[in-house]
Image (cartoon, rainbow, N blue to C red):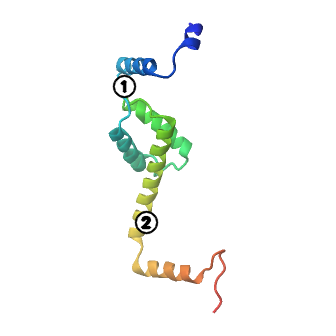
Amino acid sequence: MANALVTYEWTGRTIEYHRAQIREHLGFRECSVADADKLTAWFAEHVACKERRQEQVRVELLVRCRTESIEPPTAGRCDRVVGAALRAAEEMLTTRISARLTVESIERIVRLGRRSRPGGRRRTR
C-alpha cells in the first residue's frame, strides 16, 4: 500500500478522475464560482463581522464547506474568499457606523482632521 502511494500520479487526469469518484461517493461537489460568491457573502454577514483573525475565518470556511458538501477550495482560493469576506464585513460595519453619525458629528470629525498634521501634531495658528 505504501509503495502504491509513492508511485501514484499526484497530477494529471488520474488524480482528477479519482477526486471526482471520491466526491461522488461522499456526496460532495467542486466549489464553483457561485459557491465561492455565496460563501463570501455568508461569511461577511455571519463570521467575519465577529471574527477578524484570517486563520480562524479560514477554519470556519472549511467547516462551512463540509456542512454544504462542497470540496474545500484550493489554499489560494480560500485566501481570496476569506479576504473578500473580511473586506465586505469591514465595509458593512463602516456603513452601519457612518449611518448613525449626525451631521454635527461629521462636521466635527472633518474639522479635527483638518487641524491634525501627519504624525499626529496639531497645526499652530
125 vs 111: above or below: below
Classify mark 2: helix, strand or loop. Answer: helix
96 vs 85: above or below: below
Q: Name the residue under label 2.
A: 97
Q: What residue type is labelled 2?
A: Ile
User: Which residue is painted at 35% across and 36% down in the image?
Assistant: 32
Q: Which amino acid does label 1 sit on?
A: Phe
Task: Give 59 or 7, whichever is nearer the viewer.
Answer: 7
Q: Is residue 6 left or right of residue 91?
A: right
- Which image quarter is the N terminus in? top right
Q: Mark 1 points at which residue?
A: 28
**x and y percentages locating residue 65 in the rendered image:** 41, 33
Classify mark 1: helix, strand or loop. Answer: loop
**x and y percentages locating residue 75 in the rendered image:** 51, 36
Q: How far apart are marks 2 and 1 (CA)?
A: 40 Å
* Residue 68, quarter of picture: top left
Please tell me how crowded label 1 is: few (under 14), some (14-19), or many (20+) other residues with Cα within 10 Å. Answer: some
User: For the residues carrying marks 2 and 1, which lies nearer the camera in this image?
Assistant: 1
Q: How many marks?
A: 2
125 vs 55: above or below: below
Q: Residue furthest front?
A: 12
Q: Residue 88 carries which label?
A: none
User: Which residue is painted at 46% across and 40% down in the image?
Assistant: 77
User: Which residue is painted at 47% across and 51% down in the image?
Assistant: 86
